[in-house]
Amino acid sequence: MRDCDEAEDQRISPQARKVLVAAGIGHFIEWYDVGTYGLLAAYLAANFFVSDNPTAGLLATFAVSAVGFVLRPLGGLFFGPLGDRIGRQRTLVIVVLLTSGSTFAMGALPTYDSVGILAPVLLVIARMLQGFGAGGETSNAVALLFEHSPRTRRGYTTSWMDGIGFVASVAGSALALVLINVLGDGAMTEWGWRIPFLLALPLGLVGLYLRVQLADSPEFRELEAEGDVAESPTKEAFRTGYKAMLVLCGILLLKAIGHWALVSFLPSFLSGDLGFSSSETFTTTTIAIGITAIAVPVMGAVSDRVGRKPMLIAGSAGFVVCSWPAFYLMSLGNLVAAISAMLLLGLLIAVFDGALSAMMAEQFPARIRSGAMAIPYNLVVSAFGGTVPYVATWMVASTGSKLAPSFYVMFLAAVTLVVAITAIRETAPRRTRAAGGRDPEPTRQP
């Protein structure tokens, strides 16, 4: 009987696969924009910021990118608890409309030559709206997929969200690079930069259609049927889950710095500070992020077997040890060395991300799960993830050292490592059962 139960516990249902596709669309749009924005930063600077200093224009463009993260905590505070009140599926429908619409708007904006100072103002507004919507994407998508998935395979299924994000970054970068090579700098500066952003609209419509067709998670439907949906999930999350939320803040430091550095800062670092050509930068980025995208679900499956905690410790310890050597390899100016360095960091992120999403969801009961994840996730991502390109570019410019950003990464990774060792309890069902304990996943608020 136990063997039958375990077999059933590992079966991924067709409904869970549909949820994975529909939830993945929103993630794709969010990270597609990240990849596109990073590679097209120079063209955006030329169209929205007038400056005789190219570095100043680039910093202004990265600052606007960071502004997009300013509203993420507010978006998380709004859309996270909203998912606990009206359901994950309904909230994700609203989120995909907002994120795809604001990304499309960025491609349709007038430039500085047309409307003057109004152009960067509108760009900032579009980025803020996008950030507000993105604040509700991860927590609701992870919660919906987590609650549809087999209990002993939730590391594997939820880790696909991060894998899809990496694929989207490569897709955005690939499209931007193809347009640069086909159209040339002149046409790209004049109008070609708009195309990748405008494509967010049809992508968003596909995501909208898929999400409208979904049923909400079994756990949320059960809460509705029993009249047990939280009336004030935000208050309940802070009252009963504040300790776990604080722990997540420490864990998410590496997620923020590592993930956004890999897909946003490092491509511009290679082509700008290190002098690699656009083709070499794209080759390095595609190989490293592409392999990372494949590795994340593999590591998610590993986390189902060995546990979440060992994976989090291994990933963060790897960043402490390997960040400086990786930046040093990139600084040599050799393509093979740069690919090896970026791939090393990517694989370390894959180890970490493979366990992260399931671990976050396992900290909270269904009543408050989305909101309790969204609040720390978006606070940390906004403070440390969105500012990575700006801070790292500033560190290189102010110190004159191309290795300076590695110390910033190492410090934050060290904080995450300490938190992972001292404050995280094992939550993977297979590991807790093997140790003779109960499945730790809470299903009701005590």
Image (cartoon, rainbow, N blue to C red):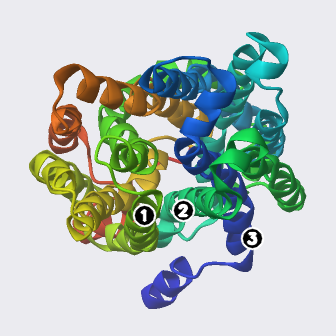
> Circles 2 and 3: CB distance less than 8 Å?
no
**Residue 300, horizontal then vertical, whole percent:** 40, 67
Q: Going from the N terminus, do you reach mark 2 or mark 1 first?
A: 2
Secondary structure found at label 2: helix
143 or 294, which is in the foreground?
A: 294
Q: CA distance from mark 2 to mark 1?
A: 7 Å
The answer to whether residue 402 is above or below residue 167 is above
**Residue 125, horizontal then vertical, whole percent:** 73, 19
Residue 321 horizontal side relative to residue 23, left or right: left
Q: CA distance from mark 1 to mark 3?
A: 25 Å
Task: Give the label, 1 or 3, closer to the camera.
Answer: 1
> Circles 2 and 1: CB distance less than 8 Å?
yes
**Residue 177, horizontal then vertical, whole percent:** 59, 60
Outermost residue toward the top in this view: 117
Q: Which mark is residue 18?
A: 3
| Residue for badge 1 | 289
Task: Give the label, 2 or 3, closer to the camera.
Answer: 2
Q: Is residue 226 visible?
A: no
**Residue 407, horizontal then vertical, whole percent:** 15, 34
Q: Going from the N terminus, do you reach mark 1 or mark 3 first?
A: 3
| Residue for badge 2 | 170
The answer to whether residue 404 is above or below residue 254 is above
